[in-house]
Image (tube, rainbow, N blue to C red):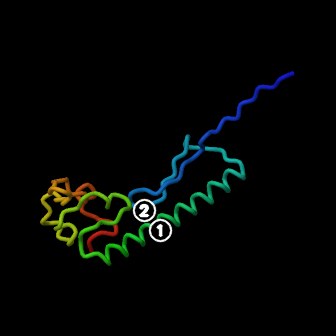
């Protein structure tokens, strides 16, 4: 007699850091019935991602304080090019265009305009 079996892996939930340094939980359905072991694993994952989000936010705040311009923090939407005015906290003078000096000067939309000029870990 032969037995044919299939082990299927089903994703019940995913946990990730959002652009605003929050903890983003996505489940396959609104209501999910977890086993005690699955619930404990989800709780551990939520705690781990929460710690990572807090560390990323603190790292960006420290980088923003240390930098006088130039390189932007790498987490969330702060990776988008930001104009000089917004880097200096002068959002009212923002033209919506950020100049990026690679090999040639390139124009990009100012990244902070997509977040209503509220930079997380950005200009003070």
105 to the left or right of 22: left
Q: CA distance from mark 2 to mark 1?
A: 7 Å
Front-most of residues 50 and 71: 71
Label of residue 70 in the image? none
- Whether residues under marks 2 and 1 lie with C-beta atoms below 8 angstroms apart, the answer is yes
In the image as oriented, which residue stretches furthest toward the right?
1
Q: Quadrant of residue 97?
A: bottom left
Front-most of residues 122 and 106: 106
- Residue 82: image location, x then y, percent: 23, 61
Quadrant in which the N terminus appears: top right
- Residue 111: image location, x then y, percent: 25, 57
Residue labelled with disc 2: 21
Q: Quadrant of residue 21?
A: bottom left
In the image as oriented, which residue stretches furthest toward the bottom?
66
The residue that appears at 64% across and 39% down in the rendered structure is 9
The residue that appears at 25% across and 76% down in the rendered structure is 68
Query: Relative to 31, is 101 above or below?
Result: below
Residue labelled with disc 1: 54
For label 1, the SS is helix
For label 2, the SS is loop
């Amino acid at each position: 007699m032969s037995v044919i079996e299939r082990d299927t892996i089903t994703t019940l939930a995913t946990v990730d850091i959002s652009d605003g340094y929050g903890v983003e939980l996505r489940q396959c359905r609104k209501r999910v019935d977890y086993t005690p072991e699955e619930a404990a694993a989800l709780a551990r994952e939520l705690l781990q991602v929460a710690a990572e989000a807090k560390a990323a936010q603190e790292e960006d705040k420290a980088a923003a304080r240390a930098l006088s311009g130039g390189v932007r923090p790498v987490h969330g939407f702060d990776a988008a090019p930001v104009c000089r005015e917004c880097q200096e906290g002068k959002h009212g003078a923002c033209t919506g265009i950020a100049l990026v000096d690679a090999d040639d000067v390139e124009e990009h939309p100012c990244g902070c305009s997509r977040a209503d000029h509220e930079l997380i870990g950005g200009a003070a």
